[in-house]
Amino acid sequence: MNITHASFVTLPVADQERALRFYAEVLGFEVTADLDMPQGRWLQVAPKGAQTVFTLSGPGMGGFEPGTTRGIMLVTTDVDADCTRLAQAGVSVQGPDDLPWGRMAGFQDPDGNGLMLLTEAAQ
């Protein structure tokens, strides 16, 4: 096998503009693609410098159901500061909690897709 990385993760959303505001303004992601396609808008965002991007898949783009994605792990250098920022933006956050692999918290995007924040434990 010669796989080097995942290209994109699909996040099904009901409203791409609302999702874009959340991912760009709250999480600080950058837009990596914003194209009009025959079946709808192809909108991708990512943390600065990331190899893997997130496709904010709106209605008509692949038949995905908004709010069904779970377990997306976002690594951060400061989970506590990020949780504070999320809470200040009105996002409900579960945690952070200390676990053997690091300090972790969970939250949902406006469509109910489940994301996690992780500050990895020192090795």
Image (spheres, rainbow, N blue to C red):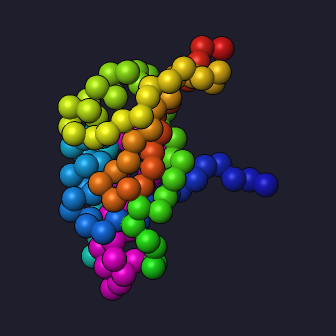
Give x and y (percent) for residue 30: 29, 46
Task: Name the residue furthest right.
Answer: 1
Give x and y (percent) for residue 118: 50, 30
Image position of 29 (left or right of 88): right
Give x and y (percent) for residue 120: 56, 23
Q: Is residue 53 magenta?
A: yes
Name the quadrant containing residue 39: bottom left
Q: Is residue 44 above or below residue 50?
A: below
Image position of 97 (left or right of 89): right
Give x and y (percent) for residue 15: 25, 67
Q: Is residue 35 above or below residue 120?
A: below
Image position of 13 (left or right of 50): left
Which residue is at 25% across, 55% downward?
A: 20
Quadrant where the N terminus sits is bottom right
Which residue is at 46% across, 78% downward?
A: 62
Quadrant where the C terminus sits is top right
Q: Is residue 37 above or below residue 55?
A: below
Q: Nearer the viewer, residue 73 or 47?
A: 73
Q: Is residue 89 magenta?
A: no
Q: Which residues are magenta?
A: 37-61
Q: Is residue 32 visible?
A: no
Name the quadrant containing residue 90: top left
Task: Name the residue furthest bottom.
Answer: 38
Q: Nearer the viewer, residue 53 or 56?
A: 56
Which residue is at 39% across, 67% downward?
A: 66
User: What count of labels does the image hold?
Assistant: 0
Q: Is residue 61 visible?
A: yes
